[in-house]
């Protein structure tokens, strides 16, 4: 059943009453302008001993009118245990009677329930916030519940009559409703209040200095997946969306921006600085997405669609020959893992590793050492080692390629700059390519 929300109607100037809360005693108010009832008025105390159900409606609420067959059946089923009364405080008896006649003619539904017409004083007692709106009053004359029309069921009526507890949702009155600013994003900067649990969300904004940088796609048992790229350049955002796999730290392996082939106008604005330049928020983005546990690949598909919608770029992995920084091994027997615990420690003054994959070494070098992090050349593993790296310990200047290669000689390892076929992420702007012939 759809909740029909209506504008605020003027209420009678009589101010003898106040809005009632759950558990309040109902004043012995005299209901007026009754039809389908032996008298034109009746005091509320007349219905003591019964579960009194007031169903607020008007002729503009299709959900209200469509519920009439249900109301008639409920009244017939529970007989004298309950009394359902229709309440239309805003419209006259003539308008209500005309609606009854029309419904009888069109749908052969004859409304016989007692109905209150045009009694606006009732709006001083009950905080009607939408239609259909149901007021439940117990047999002793106390306010039991405010609910929407969907809660008016045989099961719920039986539970209340039998004094059983059921989780029947309370309706919210106008005084507690939050009105949001439609021109602003919902739940951002408190617009619309704050939600307890976000089921699904994706948001893209410009950078914000006060937020700590973060990057990765992670899975949580309680909420599902979180994709976050806080204060990142666009190149990093695309690598998160198109990275090939997730590592144990929640990062997406895919290399650095030197693995991206741009066919986009002014693409330099999307790259992370390589010379220590200051970072400005105009070049940074914040992307955050929360999803249920739909799977890592699905998270990336949604993220890719978000990026395409906003930036309009096409992106895909391609094979391409490019100048690379290649790690080679003369004899993998010298570097095979033999014994000992896992160690992966990389600093500017050297490295110490044992029982780690070559891919982990590559990723750590790209992350921690400027020689590789800011290199124009993608770092590639060509050692041929399929197992784990064994005990390797060197002390040297990790920012100097010659010094690093000298230190690695004892292990038969060497970095060489040469052409190699690799996977690169092609990002192109179709409109720009068509315009400039690229």
Image (cartoon, rainbow, N blue to C red):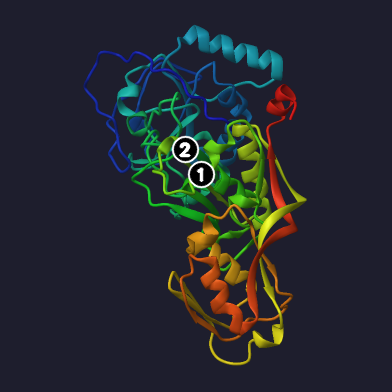
Closest to the observer: 350 or 177?
350
Q: Marks 2/1: CA distance?
A: 6 Å
In what quadrant of the picture does the C terminus appear?
top right
Residue 352, position as x, y percentages in the image: 50, 80
Residue 146, position as x, y percentages in the image: 41, 37
Q: Residue at the location (61% across, 39% down)? A: 306
Closest to the observer: 372 or 186?
372
In what quadrant of the picture does the N terminus appear?
top right
Q: Residue at the location (53% across, 72% down)? A: 404
Left or right of 25 on screen, residue 74: right
Residue located beneath label 2 in the image: 283
Left or right of 85 on screen, residue 327: right
Residue located beneath label 1 in the image: 233
**Rendering quarter of residue 294:** bottom right
Q: Residues within 10 Å of mark 1 (few under 14, many from 20)?
A: many
Vertically, is 434 above or below 106? below
Vertically, is 271 above or below 266? below
Q: Are marks 2 and 1 in contact (CB under 8 Å)?
A: yes
Vertically, is 232 above or below 119? below
Vertically, is 236 above or below 324? above
């Amino acid at each position: 059943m759809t909740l029909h929300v209506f504008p605020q109607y003027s209420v009678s100037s009589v101010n003898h009453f106040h809005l009632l809360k759950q558990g309040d005693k109902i004043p012995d108010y005299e209901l007026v302008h009754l039809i389908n009832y032996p008298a034109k008025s009746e005091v509320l105390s007349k219905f003591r001993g019964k579960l009194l159900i007031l169903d607020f409606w008007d002729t503009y609420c299709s959900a209200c009118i469509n519920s009439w067959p249900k109301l008639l059946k409920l009244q017939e089923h529970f007989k004298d245990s309950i009394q359902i009364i229709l309440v239309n405080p805003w419209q006259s008896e003539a308008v209500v009677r005309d609606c009854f006649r029309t419904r009888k003619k069109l749908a052969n539904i004859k409304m016989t329930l007692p109905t209150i017409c045009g009694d606006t004083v009732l709006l001083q007692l009950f905080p009607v916030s939408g239609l259909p709106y149901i007021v439940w009053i117990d047999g002793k004359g106390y306010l039991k519940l405010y609910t929407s029309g969907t809660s008016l069921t045989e099961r719920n009526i039986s539970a209340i009559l039998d004094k059983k507890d059921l989780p029947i949702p309370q309706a919210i009155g106008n005084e507690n409703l939050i009105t949001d600013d439609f021109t602003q994003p919902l739940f951002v900067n408190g617009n619309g209040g704050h939600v307890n649990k976000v089921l699904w969300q994706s948001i893209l904004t410009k950078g914000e200095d006060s937020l700590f940088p973060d990057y990765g796609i992670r899975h949580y048992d309680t909420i599902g997946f979180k994709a976050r790229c806080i204060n990142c350049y666009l190149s990093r955002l695309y690598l998160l969306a198109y990275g090939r796999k997730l590592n144990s730290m929640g990062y997406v392996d895919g290399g650095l921006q030197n693995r991206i082939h741009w066919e986009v106008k002014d693409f330099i604005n999307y790259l992370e600085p390589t010379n220590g330049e200051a970072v400005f928020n105009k070049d940074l983005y914040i992307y955050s997405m929360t999803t249920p546990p739909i799977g890592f690949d699905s998270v990336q598909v949604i993220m890719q669609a978000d990026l395409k919608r906003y930036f309009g770029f096409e992106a895909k992995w391609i094979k391409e020959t490019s100048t690379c920084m290649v790690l080679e091994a003369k004899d993998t027997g010298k570097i095979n893992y033999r014994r000992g615990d896992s160690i992966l420690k990389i600093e500017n003054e050297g490295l110490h590793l044992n029982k780690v994959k070559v891919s982990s070494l590559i990723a750590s070098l790209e992350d921690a050492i400027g020689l590789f992090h800011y290199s124009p050349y993608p770092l590639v593993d060509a050692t041929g080692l399929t197992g784990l790296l064994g005990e390797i310990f060197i002390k040297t200047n990790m920012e100097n390629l010659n010094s690093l290669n000298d230190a690695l000689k004892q292990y038969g390892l060497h970095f060489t700059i040469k052409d190699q076929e690799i996977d690169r992420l092609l990002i192109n702007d179709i409109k720009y390519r068509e315009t400039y012939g690229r």
